[in-house]
Image (cartoon, helix red, strand yellow):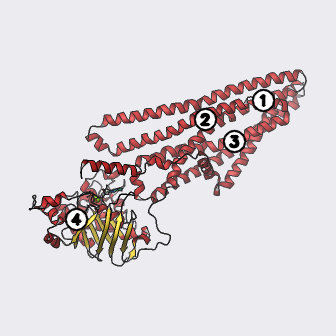
Amino acid sequence: MTEATTAEKILEESEERPKEKAIDKKSKTGETLKRLTVGMSGGENKGKFISGTILRFFALMALVTLPFITGQAMNVINEGGATEDLWQWVIGGVIAGAIFLVLSFLADRTFASLATKALYKLQTDLFKNLQTLSMGFFYRTPVGELLSRITNDAEVVAQYYEQGIAQIIRAVMFIIMIIVVMLAIDVRLTVVAMLIVPVVVISMLVITRIASPAFEKMQEQLGETSGFQEETLAGHKVIISKRRQSWADEVNEANAADVFDVGSKAFFTSLMQFPLTQTLSYIQVVMVYVVGSLMVIEGQTTLGTVTAFAGYVALMASPLSQISNLVSSALNAAAGGERVYNIVDEEPTVFDAPDAIEYEFKGGHIEFKDVDFGYVPGRLILRDNNFDVAPGESIGICGPTGAGKSTIINILTRYYDINSGQILIDGQDLAKLTRESLRKQIGAVLQEAFLFTDTVMNNLKYANAEATDEDVIEAAKKANAHDFIMNLPQGYDTLLTERGANLSQGQRQMITIARAMVADPKIMILDEATSNVDTRTEKLIQDGLRALMAGKTSFSIAHRLATIRDSHKIMVVNGGEIVEMASHDELMAQKGFYYALYMSQFKGAAPGGMEAVAMDFVST
Ligand SMILES: Nc1ncnc2c1ncn2[C@@H]1O[C@H](COP(=O)(O)OP(=O)(O)OP(=O)(O)O)[C@@H](O)[C@H]1O
Ligand SMILES: [Mg+2]
């Protein structure tokens, strides 16, 4: 392939590959907020949510009586009333205060438990759905992005649940109550007290208009920053070996600076809200006192009423300033929530058909009929694949890098669905089988060995939870992994670190092979399973594998042809097509593609004409 065509292909692919941003679609703030709120207040939480709201209502009622009581006490003093009358109001005030405290505590507790529940549900939904998604999703979404959704985005939603919703209810309810009480006491003073409210509301709207896009931008930027950090950590080896630490530092600093810029703008504007509403509220109190005093002098109202009004205006300042903050925190939550929901709603591209049936193992007869497949639309990787594998046959697969060998395995295990054609397994159409039943019978040791941060024993049991320790040890012995496991510091109880980094590549492969053996599947797939072990160890493992695979249909992909030489049949894949399929001896006699490959590996030099064949090696 020439330079130009490679570049074209990469370009083509990057255009086809849906960028993560694309799933963010257009903003639907209102819808997301509603969905978030219903997550806390709907369904089985409804009763609890209503009782929390009722508790809050009565708590605020008690609080709202306080300025009125103060006013009445003031009137008693002003009119030179009896001490008993004063005491009456004092005791009334204490009782109202106590009721407010107790009911607020109960309401807070109710809302806190609802918040925790809603958050727990959102996070489990998110994780659960991630588990159902198909390979394609993980291929196009970097892990760092996903982690950011699970941490940063879920965090802003958590804040909305933990404080936002309860405070919005509280603030709105409180403001309405205060207005109603004020109207009941004195309409004219209410008008004076409310004069400044539109100013507060307008300034709040202006501020949120500036702050909320900044918050949205900040969330996005945060995602990018942690995505980069995750990738750098995962790729630390490359970074260190290529001495790119300072580059990583620079990129990270630039990212962090971007977060800082948008973040400080967002926070500054939203912080402005508090002093602004406070100042406006003081102006309002002064206005009430000035107008109120004039009215008292003219005998139109009492000093007590004016005092009560000043109290109400002061009480209103806090929910009013809160509302503006809450609006921006709600918008922030909507931005984060939307990104979380995008994953919660993401649907697997490979799923069981509604009428899917369980795969019934009948020996392991596998047929590919005119199978076409591509990972992305418009770019076929496998073309017109036809082959037939009899029950119990062992198939070796070889071919150049990128030829499509792993891809054949990916569609056989239904990690991806094919574009056209048909795959039959024991006469049953693969597309109509449940994935669960299929994967129970097909065991695969894939090209990328992944081990969990857990003991060797648990890693080995991963594919078969019912296996006993004895089963595991027996399988490890068969895979010839037992001796090296026993040599680990704590034998089978040795804790492997993430990605199995405290083992050599070959040792990791041996563990994954033993893991497949523990599962003891009916059909076995090995993708470069022994590519990282020395030839002597490979021989040992092969012996074990042969025992395991005896009589079972199996596929082994290998670049080292000696590994698959003894297979019943060898399938040669080139450029997404099966170019040869026969036994080693037959293929050698044909002097075709396989012959050329084989000779180049074993003789080091090609026989006449081989260069011409080698030139034809193509990736897909
Ligand atoms: N998940 C994927 N999404 C999109 N394209 C992919 C994916 N995996 C592989 N490809 C493309 O499919 C083609 C075949 O890849 P495949 O992994 O099947 O090669 P292979 O024969 O197994 O190679 P190797 O010997 O290097 O393992 C390649 O061109 C590759 O770019
Ligand atoms: Mg491969």
Q: Is mark 3 within 8 Å of ligand 1?
A: no
Give the labeled residue for mark 4: 541
Camera-near label (4 vs 2) is 2
Q: Secondary structure at mark 4?
A: helix
Give the labeled residue for mark 2: 208
Camera-near label (3 vs 2) is 2
Q: Is residue 247 above or below residue 438?
A: above
Q: Is mark 4 within 8 Å of ligand 2?
A: no
Taking the image as drawn, is residue 158 in sight? no
Which amino acid, mark 2?
Answer: Thr
Give the labeled residue for mark 1: 193
Measuring 9% from the left and 61% from the top, which residue is drawn there? 603
Q: Are marks 4 and 3 in contact (CB under 8 Å)?
A: no
Which amino acid, mark 4?
Answer: Ile
Q: Residues within 10 Å of mark 3 (few under 14, many from 20)?
A: some
Q: Earlier in the sequence, mark 1 or mark 3?
A: 3
Q: Which mark is residue 170?
A: 3
Q: Secondary structure at mark 1?
A: helix
Q: Secondary structure at mark 2?
A: helix
Q: Is residue 211 above or below residue 340?
A: above
Camera-near label (1 vs 4) is 1
Distance in Å between CA atoms under marks 1 and 4 = 86 Å
Q: Residues within 10 Å of mark 2 (few under 14, many from 20)?
A: many
Residue 428: image x %, image y %?
A: 39, 76
Q: Are marks 3 and 2 in contact (CB under 8 Å)?
A: no
Residue 224: image x %, image y %?
A: 43, 41
Q: Which mark is residue 268?
A: none
Residue situated in front as seen by the camera: 315 or 554: 554
Ligand 1 quadrant assignment: bottom left
